[in-house]
């Protein structure tokens, strides 16, 4: 039986954690990476060079793979095109099952603009002829402290909306469970959150208490949010993504807590304090 698993993004946090978990189980792995020099050296793992946008290289990299863990590409204006090219390559290479990291509330009209990219990728996978599983991850707890600017202020139009952010390691643990037995999860969509639904004011207070850095939340209007980010000189789609992160929180679309992490891994989801102090 072919149980070869390809894990993309192994040079990053999520893909790297997932690859290490599977390698520790002794599963044979293929690690498609853009830079072979950055590929992790893991038992039973072979690194191959390709990018999502290079279909011929991706086909070669995925030949013989049964299950593909497809970590969504970095934010880019052409991200959907990259994803669709890679899905086509996977199908051509004979991949049987794709596990894709999507976003909580992905929809064609999602308030968070990048959620629309994830929906487009999901739809393409649904019609690809390959089996699929979607991990709809909420925002990552791991990055919340970096929302604060140099003055320690998290600024944005989130109002008093609540956020059920998830630990990145919990997503990796869930992914590993699925990739060990993909057939049991075929056609499933899993929504992954942390155990708490908190306002950014509450998150800021936890960050302050746990790190010693004075962090606070300051609400902006949508107009103020665009104006305060203009100096970064990024294109319009990127500004839309940054600002809509907060408006998605404000409307309540990221507030719902799910039991999925515990259901699939057998242990409670991590909260913000435990993410800030992982050894505790």
Image: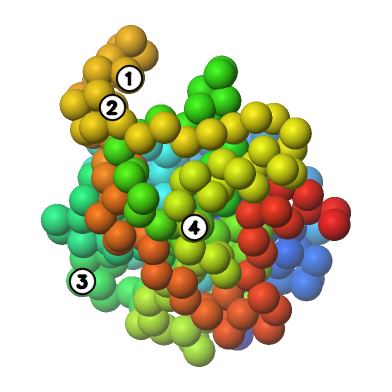
Query: Mark on residue 198?
Result: 4
Q: Residue furthest bottom?
A: 184
Vertical placement of residue 84 versus 39, above or below? below
Q: Which residue is identified by label 3?
A: 127
Image quarter for residue 82? top left
Residue under the image location 67 percent in, 75 percent down? 268
Q: Earlier in the sequence, mark 2 or mark 3?
A: 3
Q: State the residue in front, 280 or 209.
A: 209
Q: What distance separates the C-alpha of mark 3 from that of mark 1? A: 38 Å
* Colour pattern: rainbow
Q: What distance separates the C-alpha of mark 4 from that of mark 2? A: 21 Å
In the rendered image, the quadrant that contains the N terminus is bottom right
Q: What distance separates the C-alpha of mark 2 from that of mark 1? A: 6 Å
**Element on which disc 3 rests:** loop
Q: Earlier in the sequence, mark 3 or mark 1?
A: 3
What crowding class fits label 3: few (fewer than 14 Cα within 10 Å), some (14-19), or many (20 or more)? few
Residue under the image location 65 percent in, 42 percent down? 207
Mark 2 vs 3: CB contact within 8 A:
no
Q: Which percent across, then down, holds residue 261? A: 58, 75
Residue under the image location 36 percent in, 14 percent down? 232
Q: State the residue in front, 234 or 196.
A: 196
Q: Which residue is identified by label 1?
A: 229
Query: Mark on residue 225?
Result: 2
Image quarter for residue 87? bottom left
């Amino acid at each position: 039986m072919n149980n070869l698993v390809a894990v993309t993004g192994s040079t990053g946090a999520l893909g790297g954690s997932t690859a290490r978990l599977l390698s520790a189980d002794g599963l044979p792995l293929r690690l498609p990476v853009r830079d072979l020099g950055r590929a992790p050296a893991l038992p039973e793992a072979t690194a191959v060079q390709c990018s999502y946008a290079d279909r011929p290289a991706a086909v070669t990299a995925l030949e013989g793979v049964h299950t593909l863990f497809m970590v969504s590409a970095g934010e880019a204006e052409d991200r959907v095109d990259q994803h669709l090219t890679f899905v086509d390559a996977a199908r051509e290479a004979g991949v049987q099952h794709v596990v894709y990291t999507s976003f909580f509330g992905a929809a064609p009209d999602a308030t968070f603009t990048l959620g629309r990219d994830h929906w487009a990728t999901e739809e393409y996978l649904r019609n690809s002829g390959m089996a699929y599983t979607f991990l709809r991850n909420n925002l990552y707890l791991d990055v919340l402290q970096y929302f604060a600017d140099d003055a320690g202020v998290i600024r944005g139009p989130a109002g008093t909306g609540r956020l059920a952010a998830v630990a990145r390691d919990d997503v990796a643990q869930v992914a590993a469970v699925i990739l060990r037995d993909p057939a049991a999860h075929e056609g499933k969509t899993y929504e992954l959150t942390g155990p708490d639904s908190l306002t950014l004011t509450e998150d800021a207070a936890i960050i302050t208490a746990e790190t010693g850095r004075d962090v606070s939340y300051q609400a902006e209007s949508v107009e103020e949010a665009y104006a305060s980010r203009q100096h970064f000189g990024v294109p319009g789609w990127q500004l839309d993504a940054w600002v809509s992160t907060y408006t998605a929180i404000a409307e309540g679309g990221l507030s719902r807590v799910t039991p999925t992490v515990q259901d699939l891994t057998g242990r409670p989801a991590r909260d913000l304090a435990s993410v800030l102090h992982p050894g505790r």
